[in-house]
Image (cartoon, rainbow, N blue to C red):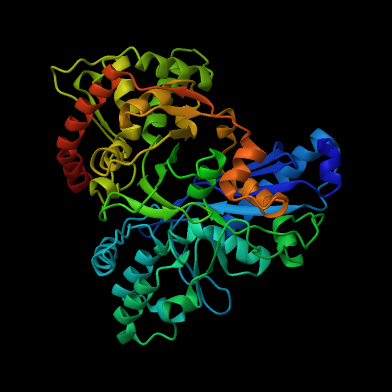
C-alpha cells in the first residue's frame, strides 16, 4: 500500500511529542516508516520564579502542529486525514500539573526545569531510602505541601504533560510506566507505584487532613501495548480544529520523552542504552539488576515495558553551545558574510577536533538553569581560562562541546566505574549528533564507550511514540516490545559506530577534573551575579 492509500484507508499512525522547544507530529505507515510530519516551535516562560508553559500554549501548539501535518499531507499526497489506526502522545517527563474536580488547573504547569524542590526531594529521598530527583512530580507535590500552598487540598488529579494531553483526548487518567516512574518510584515486581513508598507518603501527610490519599490522585500505570482508551469526539476536535479527524482511534499509553528516546534508538533491552543530547541531555542504561545503593546523581526509571533503567538527567546541554555559534554568525554578518547555519556548525565542530584533547586548560559551564547533578539550584553560563591556557578557536569550541556532556560524564562514571554496569550498545540521538561524527566522538571520549548513531535517530521522540502506538495495534504476533522493535522496525540495523580514542578519553578525564574543581567558580557566579 502506498502512503496516500495508507492515509485514505485509515491505516496511518500518528505520534505527537511535546519537546522543550518544539512540538512535533510524525505520521507513519504500516511498515513504521515516516510518511509525513508537522511541527510547531514554542518556548517555556519564566513566570513568578517558575518555568512554565500555559494551557493556552499547549493547545495552540498542538493544534498548529497538527495543522502543519495536515498541510504536509495535502502537499505530498493531495488527501485529507480522516481516520487513523492509532495515536500516541509523548512529552517532557516529570513536572507538576494539578487539577481540581472541574478539570481546572490549580497552579501553572511546573516543568522538569524547575529546581525549587530541594527540601522536598531531600526529605523524600531519606524517607524512601531512594533517590528522589528535584523534578519528579512527587517532589513538586511535597514541596507544595511544605510551602503550605492553598491549592493542594483541592487536587483531584495530578499528572504529567503527556498524561494531561492524553486525558483530554481520551478521557482516561492513565500514564505509561516510563513516564509514571518520573512521578513516583515504580516497583519492578508489581510494575506499578511502589506500595511501601505510597504508604509512607500517606502517613507523612496524614496530619494535613487532605480529602485525598496519594493513589487517589495519581494516574493509573500502563505498560506498552496495553489499552489506554480511544480518541473521543471532543478530543478529535481539540486536536484537529478543521473537524476532519474522526473519533474512535485507539491511543497508546502516554509516555515521557525518555521512553520514546529508548524506543526510537532500539534501546529497551537490558544491556543497551541511549543518550539524548539537545536542550537538555540524559542517558538511559537498561539494567540487568538493581544498583547496590541509591545515588543522588542517578534516577531510577523504567522502559515503556517496565524494565529498570538508570537515568542520568542533565538540565543543560547545547543551549550555551548554540549561543556561542550564533555569536560567530553575528560576527560573519558584521563582516558582510552570509552563512549557512549547518555549514557554520560543521566547520566549528570539525575544527574543535583539531584542538588539544584536554581543551588546553579551557573550561566551559553551560548552566542556563540549575544543575541538580552538580548541586546547583541556579545556573550562570561561564567560560573560564587562565593567562597560561592555550586559547584557540579549536580549544574554545572543544571546551564547549565537552561542557555539553560534562555533567553526563560525572553521572555515568558512577555506573561504569563504581557499579561496573555492563552495556553492549549505546546509541546517541538529538541535536548534538547532527554534525556527523563529532558529537559521537566527544561522547565516546566522555563515557569511554562506543557510540552508535542510527539514520532513523533523527526522527526523534515523535517517531518513538508513533512506534509505541504501532505496537498497540500492529503487534499481531504478540511479541514483547524489544522483539517487536528488533523484528518489525529495525530489522538488525545498528547504525554507525564510533569507538573512543585513548587520547580523547585521557584528555576528557583531565578536563573533567578541572571542571569539578572549578564548580566553586560557578557557585560564586550564582551567588553574586543576579
Which is nearer the eye, 370 or 515?
Answer: 515
Q: Picture coordinates of residue 139 (x, y %)?
A: 34, 64
Q: Is residue 462 visible?
A: no
Q: Is residue 227 left or right of residue 431?
A: right
Q: Quadrant of residue 442?
A: top left
Q: Is residue 104 above or below residue 42?
A: below
Count the labels in the image: 0
Residue at the image point whose x is 41% and y is 55% from the top: 301
Q: Is residue 237 above or below residue 503?
A: below
Q: Is residue 350 visible?
A: yes
Which is nearer the eye, 209 or 489?
Answer: 489
Residue at the image point whose x is 33% and y is 57% from the top: 133
Q: Picture coordinates of residue 262 (x, y %)?
A: 51, 44
Which is nearer the eye, 272 or 327?
Answer: 272
Residue at the image point whose x is 46% and y is 53% from the top: 307
Q: Is residue 10 left or right of residue 178?
A: right
Q: Picture coordinates of residue 461 (x, y %)?
A: 56, 43
Instruction: Please state, as top left, top right, bottom left or bottom right, where the N terminus lies in the image.
Output: top right
Q: Is residue 40 above or below residue 343?
A: below
Residue at the image point whose x is 60% and y is 60% from the top: 165
Q: Quadrant of residue 472?
A: bottom right
Q: Picture coordinates of residue 522 (x, y %)?
A: 20, 40
Q: Is residue 250 above or below residue 513?
A: below
Amino acid at each position: 500500500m502506498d502512503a496516500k492509500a495508507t492515509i485514505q484507508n485509515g491505516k496511518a499512525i500518528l505520534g505527537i511529542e511535546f519537546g522543550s522547544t518544539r512540538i512535533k507530529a510524525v505520521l507513519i505507515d504500516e511498515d513504521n516508516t515516516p510518511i509525513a510530519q508537522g511541527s510547531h516551535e514554542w518556548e517555556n516562560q519564566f513566570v513568578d520564579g517558575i518555568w512554565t508553559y500555559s494551557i493556552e500554549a499547549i493547545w495552540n501548539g498542538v493544534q498548529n502542529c497538527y495543522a502543519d501535518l495536515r498541510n504536509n499531507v495535502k502537499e505530498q499526497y493531495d488527501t485529507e486525514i480522516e481516520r487513523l489506526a492509532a495515536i500516541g502522545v509523548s512529552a517532557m517527563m516529570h513536572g507538576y500539573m494539578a487539577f481540581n474536580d472541574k478539570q481546572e488547573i490549580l497552579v501553572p504547569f511546573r516543568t522538569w526545569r524547575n529546581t525549587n524542590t530541594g527540601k522536598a526531594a531531600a526529605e523524600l529521598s531519606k524517607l524512601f531510602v531512594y533517590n528522589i530527583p528535584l523534578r519528579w512530580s512527587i517532589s513538586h507535590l511535597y514541596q507544595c505541601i511544605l510551602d503550605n500552598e492553598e491549592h493542594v487540598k483541592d487536587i483531584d488529579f495530578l499528572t504529567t504533560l503527556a498524561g494531561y494531553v492524553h486525558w483530554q483526548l481520551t478521557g482516561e487518567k492513565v500514564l505509561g510506566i516510563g513516564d509514571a516512574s518520573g512521578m513516583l518510584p515504580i516497583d519492578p515486581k508489581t510494575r506499578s507505584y511502589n506500595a511501601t513508598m505510597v504508604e509512607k507518603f500517606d502517613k507523612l501527610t496524614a496530619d494535613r487532613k487532605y480529602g485525598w490519599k496519594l493513589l487517589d490522585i495519581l494516574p493509573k500505570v500502563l505498560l506498552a501495548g496495553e489499552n489506554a482508551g480511544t480518541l473521543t469526539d471532543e478530543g478529535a476536535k481539540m486536536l484537529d480544529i478543521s473537524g476532519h479527524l474522526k473519533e474512535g482511534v485507539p491511543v497508546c499509553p502516554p509516555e515521557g520523552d525518555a521512553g520514546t528516546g529508548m524506543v526510537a534508538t532500539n534501546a529497551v533491552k537490558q544491556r543497551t542504552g541511549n543518550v539524548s543530547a539537545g536542550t537538555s541531555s540524559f542517558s538511559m542504561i537498561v539494567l540487568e539488576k538493581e544498583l547496590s545503593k541509591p545515588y543522588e546523581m542517578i534516577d531510577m526509571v523504567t522502559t515503556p515495558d517496565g524494565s529498570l533503567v538508570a537515568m542520568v538527567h542533565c538540565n543543560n546541554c547545547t543551549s550555551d553551545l548554540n549561543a556561542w555559534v550564533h555569536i560567530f554568525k553575528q560576527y560573519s554578518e558584521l563582516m558582510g558574510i552570509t552563512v549557512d547555519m549547518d555549514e557554520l556548525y560543521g566547520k566549528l565542530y570539525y575544527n574543535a577536533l583539531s584542538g588539544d584533547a584536554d581543551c588546553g586548560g579551557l573550561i566551559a559551564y553551560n548552566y542556563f538553569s540549575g544543575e541538580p547533578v552538580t548541586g546547583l539550584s541556579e545556573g550562570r553560563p561561564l567560560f573560564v581560562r587562565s593567562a597560561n591556557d592555550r586559547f584557540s578557536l579549536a580549544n574554545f569550541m572543544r571546551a564547549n562541546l565537552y561542557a555539553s556532556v560534562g555533567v553526563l560524564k560525572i553521572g555515568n562514571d558512577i555506573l561504569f566505574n563504581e557499579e561496573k554496569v555492563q552495556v553492549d550498545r549505546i546509541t546517541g540521538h538529538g541535536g548534538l549528533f547532527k554534525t556527523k561524527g563529532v558529537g559521537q566522538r566527544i561522547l565516546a571520549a566522555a563515557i569511554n564507550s562506543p557510540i552508535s548513531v542510527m539514520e532513523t535517530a533523527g526522527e526523534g521522540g515523535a517517531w518513538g511514540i508513533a512506534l509505541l502506538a504501532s505496537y498497540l495495534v500492529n503487534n499481531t504476533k504478540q511479541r514483547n516490545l524489544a522483539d517487536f522493535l528488533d523484528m518489525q522496525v529495525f530489522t538488525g540495523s545498528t547504525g554507525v559506530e564510533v569507538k573512543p580514542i585513548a587520547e580523547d578519553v585521557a584528555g576528557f578525564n583531565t578536563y573533567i577534573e578541572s571542571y569539578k574543581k572549578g564548580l566553586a567558580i560557578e557557585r560564586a557566579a550564582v551567588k553574586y551575579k543576579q
